[in-house]
Image (spheres, rainbow, N blue to C red):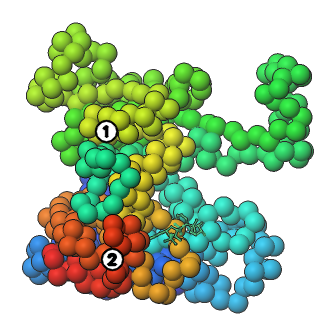
């Protein structure tokens, strides 16, 4: 039995059990939630109301979530370290700063209960601890970031045919240039690294690509993380009956990292999913190059695209792409571009996961200037909750919410961010009115 410093788990409800990657979800699971900072309290509370109402509607009294509040961000600091000042905080080690905003209790609870959802958290003032969100992913080893992107009818979008976009991004979460292994310019660390590269790796002294004044960020990529990501993407494609998995990379230039990512991806596809997949290369020989024929034969097509070309592809030929697997940086860029193509981050859901933990989250930040005004769009966290419900196998409730969100937006009952983009602009409704409409339309 896990012991917490301050948390008190609900007395009702049961734990989700995960064994060898198999999830056993009871009808009354305990699910962790983090309110978040800024607009977090507003969007988290309406998200829980919508989810509870949908579950009740879909399953009557047979199923119910027991919500377990855990803490991160400002609320954690107030609960666990109420008297610490900003000055004192700055003097703490990065590890201790982390504990102020992301207590061990929170990490323990997520590991124990497996499923969680969070509002956005502000990046704290401390000097060494980069971000609560990055911290959560790293400490919980959440290697996979899942971001589905589709267009909700009625949401104004900048492209001609936003409905053609129905893609699911799988982004690696822990390595690549995001690993945080860096040296600022003109520091001892940078000098040591430059010296090492010149002496050991024989980079010429006069190279204009490596100057004395350069800053350095290191880009590690491993077969373990890359294969795990691609395995998740193909698994997802099988489960959700998707037909194409595209590996995106810049392997023509970064051969030792992104080039390997591509190779490892094909290795996983061929070694672990041989009977299910056909690569684009094999398509000619086995199906006379006919994609439709391969799909009719129940195959998933695995192809790869160079990242810069991929930015064009998703604009010009979005119908051809379904599930995308990308390294960290490419995934960050492409998921935001795709979200923009369907109208922005207001309705962009996301989750971070591994085999044992599924952590859904709003993809936008704390939007401080809107905090406490009951005006922000709660769409992102509500649709993130749908991802969580789908992971639990409670697809009926998820579908009900998604349909209701579409219906609500189509009836032009929308928050300010959407109302102002309509032509002509209309009067917005509040966060709570919007969620009440969603509940009414379930
Ligand atoms: P942000 O909080 O996402 O907000 C930037 C702007 O985006 C807002 O001012 C608003 O634009 C629009 N926006 C964001 N969420 C919206 C929503 N739900 N509905 C409608 N409009 C929305 O980005 P930021 O200002 O760069 O970051 C603020 C803080 O959040 C930082 O401390 C950052 O570190 C943190 N952050 C956290 C996460 C996370 O927890 N996952 C992610 C990103 C950032 P308008 O004012 O123009 O309407």
**Residue 122 versus residue 252 in the image, above or below:** below
* In the foreground, 59 or 244: 244
Q: Is residue 55 left or right of residue 358?
A: left
Mark 1 near mark 2, Cβ–Cβ under 8 Å? no
Q: Position of residue 202 (x, y in %)?
A: 82, 18
Q: Secondary structure at mark 2?
A: loop
Q: Is residue 287 left or right of residue 35?
A: left
Is the CB of mark 2 within 8 Å of ligand 1?
A: no
**Residue 101 versus residue 318 in the image, above or below:** below
Q: Which residue is mark 2?
A: 426
* Residue beneath the point at 36% across and 84% down: 430
Q: Is residue 195 left or right of residue 357?
A: right
Q: Which residue is mark 1?
A: 318
Q: Position of residue 392 (x, y in %)?
A: 24, 62
Name the residue furthest top. 285
Q: Secondary structure at mark 1?
A: helix
C-alpha distance separating marks 1 and 2: 30 Å
* In the foreground, 14 or 327: 327
Quadrant in which the N terminus appears: bottom left
Quadrant in which the C terminus appears: bottom left
* Residue beneath the point at 35% across and 56% down: 157
Tell me where residue 96 sits by quadrant: bottom right
Mark 1 surroundings: few (<14), some (14-19) or many (≥20) residues within 10 A: some
């Amino acid at each position: 039995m896990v012991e917490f410093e301050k948390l008190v788990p609900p007395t009702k409800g049961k734990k989700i059990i995960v064994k060898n990657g198999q999830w056993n979800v009871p009808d009354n699971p305990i699910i962790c939630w983090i309110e978040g900072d800024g607009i977090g309290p507003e969007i988290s509370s309406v998200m829980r109301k919508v989810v509870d109402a949908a579950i009740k509607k879909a399953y009557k009294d047979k199923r119910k979530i027991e919500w377990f509040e855990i803490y991160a961000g400002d609320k954690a600091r107030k609960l666990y370290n109420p008297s610490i000042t900003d000055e004192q905080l700055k003097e703490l080690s990065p590890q201790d700063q982390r504990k102020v905003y992301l207590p061990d209790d929170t990490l323990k609870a997520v590991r124990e209960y497996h499923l969680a959802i969070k509002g956005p958290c502000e990046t704290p003032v401390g000097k060494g601890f980069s971000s609560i969100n990055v911290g959560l992913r790293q400490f919980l080893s959440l290697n996979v970031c899942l971001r589905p992107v589709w267009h909700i009818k009625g949401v104004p979008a900048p492209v001609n045919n936003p409905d053609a976009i129905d893609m699911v991004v799988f982004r690696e979460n822990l390595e690549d240039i995001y690993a945080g292994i860096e040296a600022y310019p003109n520091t001892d660390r940078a000098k040591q690294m430059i010296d090492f590269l010149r002496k050991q790796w024989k980079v010429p002294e006069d190279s204009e690509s490596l100057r004395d004044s350069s800053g350095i960020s290191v880009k590690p990529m491993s077969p373990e993380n890359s294969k795990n990501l691609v395995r998740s993407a193909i698994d997802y494609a099988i489960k959700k009956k998707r037909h194409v998995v595209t590996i995106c990379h810049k392997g023509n230039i970064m051969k030792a990292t992104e080039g390997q990512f591509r190779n490892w991806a094909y290795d996983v596809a061929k070694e672990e999913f041989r009977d299910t997949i056909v690569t684009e290369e094999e398509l000619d020989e086995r199906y006379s190059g006919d994609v439709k024929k391969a799909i009719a034969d129940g195959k998933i097509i695995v192809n790869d695209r160079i990242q810069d070309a991929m930015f064009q592809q998703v604009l010009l030929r979005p119908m051809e792409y379904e599930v995308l697997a990308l390294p960290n940086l490419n995934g960050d860029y492409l998921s935001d571009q795709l979200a923009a193509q369907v109208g922005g981050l207001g309705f962009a859901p996301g989750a971070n996961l591994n085999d044992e933990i599924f952590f859904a989250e709003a993809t936008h930040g704390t939007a401080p200037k809107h905090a406490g005004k009951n005006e922000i769009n709660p769409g992102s966290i509500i649709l993130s909750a749908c991802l969580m419900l789908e992971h639990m196998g409670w697809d009926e409730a998820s579908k009900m919410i998604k349909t209701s969100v579409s219906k609500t937006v189509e009836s032009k009952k929308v928050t300010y961010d959407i109302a102002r983009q309509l032509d002509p602009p209309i009067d917005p409704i509040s966060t709570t009115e919007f969620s009440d409409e969603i509940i009414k339309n379930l």
